[in-house]
Image: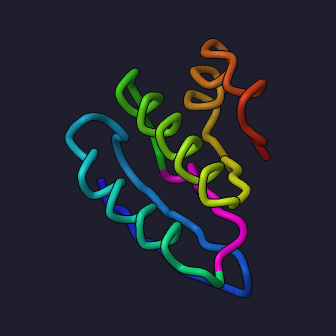
């Protein structure tokens, strides 16, 4: 798994490629902490276009990010999920909790 962040305007993006699972918990938290602590960032976008697998721990990490971003007054969206990832998000009813584009 590769995780990187970038900021453009008021949007911070977390870009990921590979397997999104428990093994990347620390790296994912470091990525979103840097965006949450950045006062210029108002929107956090988790780009899932390169994620080919996610498990229940990844769903939990996304829920934690949702909680932390809401507490910081930042909006959150999940973007460009691959078909397999989109299916998992639908099964988990994440469309009711997240904006998915």
Residue nearest the observer in this picture, 20 or 77? 77
Q: Which colour assignment does the render follow?
A: rainbow
**Can you tell which quarter of the image residue 60 is in?**
top left
Which residue shows up at 31% across the image and 35% down it?
A: 21
Which residue shows up at 34% across the image and 41% down it?
A: 19
Which percent across, then down, holds residue 80?
68, 49
Decide if residue 101 is on the left or right side of residue 23. right
Decide if residue 8 is on the left or right side of residue 24. right
**Can you tell which quarter of the image residue 10 is in?**
bottom right
Residue at the farthest front position: 71
Is residue 10 depicted above or below 2 in this figure? below
Which residue shows up at 26% across the image and 47% down it?
A: 24
Is residue 64 depicted above or below 90 in this figure? below
Which percent across, then down, holds residue 89?
62, 25
- Residue 22 part of the magenta segment: no
Decide if residue 11 is on the left or right side of residue 7. right
Residue at the farthest left position: 23
Which percent across, then down, holds residue 55?
38, 25
| Magenta segment, prevailing SS (helix, strand or loop) | strand
Q: Which residues are magenta?
A: 41-50
């Amino acid at each position: 798994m590769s995780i990187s962040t970038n900021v453009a305007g008021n949007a911070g993006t977390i870009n990921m490629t590979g397997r999104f699972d428990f093994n990347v918990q620390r790296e994912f938290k470091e990525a979103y902490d840097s965006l949450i602590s950045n006062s210029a960032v108002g929107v956090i976008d988790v780009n899932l276009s390169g994620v080919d697998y996610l498990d229940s721990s990844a769903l939990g990490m996304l829920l934690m990010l949702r909680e932390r971003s809401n507490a910081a007054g930042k909006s959150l969206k999940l973007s460009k999920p691959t078909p397999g990832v989109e299916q998992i998000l639908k099964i988990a009813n994440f469309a009711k909790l997240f904006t998915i584009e």
